[in-house]
Amino acid sequence: MSPPRALSTRIRLVLQRVRTLLESEGMGVIAAFALALLAGCAGGAVRGGDDPGARPTDLISARVEPPTALLESIDGSMPVEAFRLIGVQRDGVEVTLSSVVWSLDLLRPGGIDSMGVYTASGTAGGVVTVSGSGTSISGAMLSANATVTVTIRRTILGPGVDTSVSGHFDGAAVADPTSIDVLYPLEGAVMPGNVYPPTIQWASVGAAGDFFEVRVTKPHVEIVALLVHTGADFAHGWFVPRDVWRPVADSDMDDPVAIEVERFETATSRLIAAAATRTMRLARGSIFGNVYYEDRTSTANILRIETETATLTNVITNPYPTAEGTRCVGCHALTRDGRYAFGTNGQTQAVYDLTVDLSSDPPPSRYPLTAIGAAPSVVSFDATGTYFVGGTNVSAGLVIFDAGTGVAVVSTGLPSANSGYPSWSPDGMRIAFSGDVVVAPTGHAEAGHPIGGDLYVADRAGGSLDFASRLVHSAASLATMPEGGSNDTHAAWSPDSRYIAFQHGPGTFTHVVRNPGAIYLLGTDGALHRLDHANGGAGATDGYWPTFAPYVTTEADGRRYFWMAFYARRDYGNEWLGSRGSGRRQLWVAAIDTEPSSGVDPSFVPYWLPGQSTASSNFSAFWAPEACRATGAACSLASECCSDRCDSGAMGELTCTAPPPEECRVAGMSCGGDGDCCSDYRCDANVCTDVIL
């Protein structure tokens, strides 16, 4: 019979002390012999297969207590859970380890301190692995894991609603012809998580006094908004605040967002179920910068939307007047770094520095106004902003100009007539344009406007301004497509210069005749893709004037997205918060797969660009980084610099300078060069990012 466990443990301790004493005297053989004899007395407490040098207090395993934890953050609360790393000794005794190193595999849902106390952030949900590591007496490292599940629950009460209203939505809901089908967001839409949140909208339904529950969910997020129908002023929608949307964007990154709207009909006390669940997805990657577009309602103006905050700004508040006295600025273009903008009022043109105050009358420009007769009206800048290329109208020759002086420079190989809408590639080596342009004759509904043209590319010869033009797509090849026509126009290069997006249809414009249009993507390998999702669906013809954001994002599976802005006349939402029934041109943004597969539409269902006015006609959206000055450029204020630092140089001159290492810029912050960013990031399109082309 073996001795009791307590006695066996004491014997093992004695054995270890004896072994240590004998070995300290150099009596290893005697120690082994004595240990074997005593082990027999211990009834097998130390077996022949055990490490002779093992100690009973050595740790042999570990676990985290508690092994799982469920935390609920209610309306922003930050619940906590205390974890311990438990070590199991060889003798079976369990001890709570100190000096434990704690870590997490997912940071947004919360953080853990050195004592093992996990605190939920209150702004993100998800399942987190908590890891604890400790060291045994012998120096061996032991670790163990636990999981903590954080769920976010928030309830938003609209005006005139109290908490008792939530009880109306606890019962069984019934289907009804008046069940709500969400109009916006669109089913299957994809948008970056960091841009301004969508406004949820539905068609008119119900009567004053009815209650609505808008439910936005992910696996570990539940956002509920309770609203009351207030009568004629009720907008049948919910404007989602940014702080409320944040948990949706920061939780369960690869899961779809589900949106439902139920209605409690006060007159009958019926709970009417949602017609369907609307789903959309938030991309993992973030996009930044500003969208500059033309608002053409009564007169033309260039407006700017800051994409993260949806802030709308009039770029040039006092534009130069035309000969007739009209103050406007319409056709425009941006340098790739976002610092300079070209603008014209149709009679004169100039280039403006967007880092200076342009509110004076007249606004400052890089060179005096130049008459359109001697300079272009539709242009595109080269990769460095040194030159721009354009024509005096949409169907003339193409000329290259110095962007600092407005003076034409010598170049060769560009067309001298029947061309327009040039687009200079981001790598600076090619110019795409509409060639063989056909203009509608007098008497035609679109007299003077392009109604035909093919897609050309002019290849640059090295670092010179010499080009050789070639046809890359014949518009007639798409004449039998749903949009019809033989006009390729509004070419735009992808950020990596591998693809050209362009508009195809019977005409270039939609403000004179509402021409159908569709957007296509042409690869430099000749592969052509119709962007049906962006156009409004299979066979739809509502996609015009594409342009690309300078940012490329990466998903968890390594898939990468371009982001393309364009305009469409389709309905956005309802008639109260959206543009339903107006037919106005509105700006949309679609994700585009950077590696299209043959026969597969690489575009995704788009989202409406927040910040623009639904009461105006918006088009010609050019996406650019934050308007700031690169590191090394002259400055007078820190706010002018991408690095946010303007310091004196060796000669006393003020220049934009890189921050010291301890103040390096992190992901999402502006930068004027790679040296501004922390070591894990690169500066891409004036933003520190870990993704760069």
Image (cartoon, grey):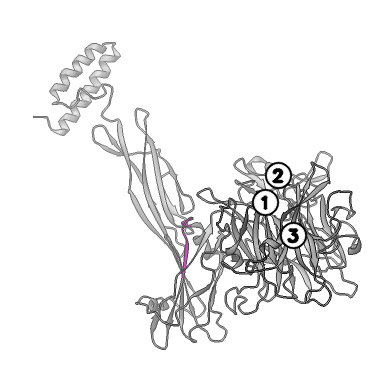
Residue 458 sits inside the magenta stretch = no
Mark 2 / mark 3, whichever is N-terminal: 3
Quadrant of residue 102 within the rendered picture: top left
Q: Which residue is mark 2?
A: 673
Left/right of residue 501 with respect to residue 301 in the rendered view? left
Q: Residue at x 49, y 61 (%)?
A: 248
Could you say which disc has been placed on residue 495 in the image?
1
Camera-side residue: 690 or 390?
390
Relative to 317, residue 134 above or below: above
Camera-side residue: 152 or 453?
453
- Of the two numbered discs 3 and 1 in the rendering, the one whose residue sits closer to the viewer: 3
Callout 1 secondary element: loop
Left/right of residue 72 with respect to residue 238 in the rendered view? left
**Circle 1 crowding by C-alpha within 10 Å: few under 14, some 14–19, many from 20:** many
**Circle 3 crowding by C-alpha within 10 Å: few under 14, some 14–19, many from 20:** many
Q: Which residue is mark 3?
A: 454
Residue 664 showing in the rendered view: no
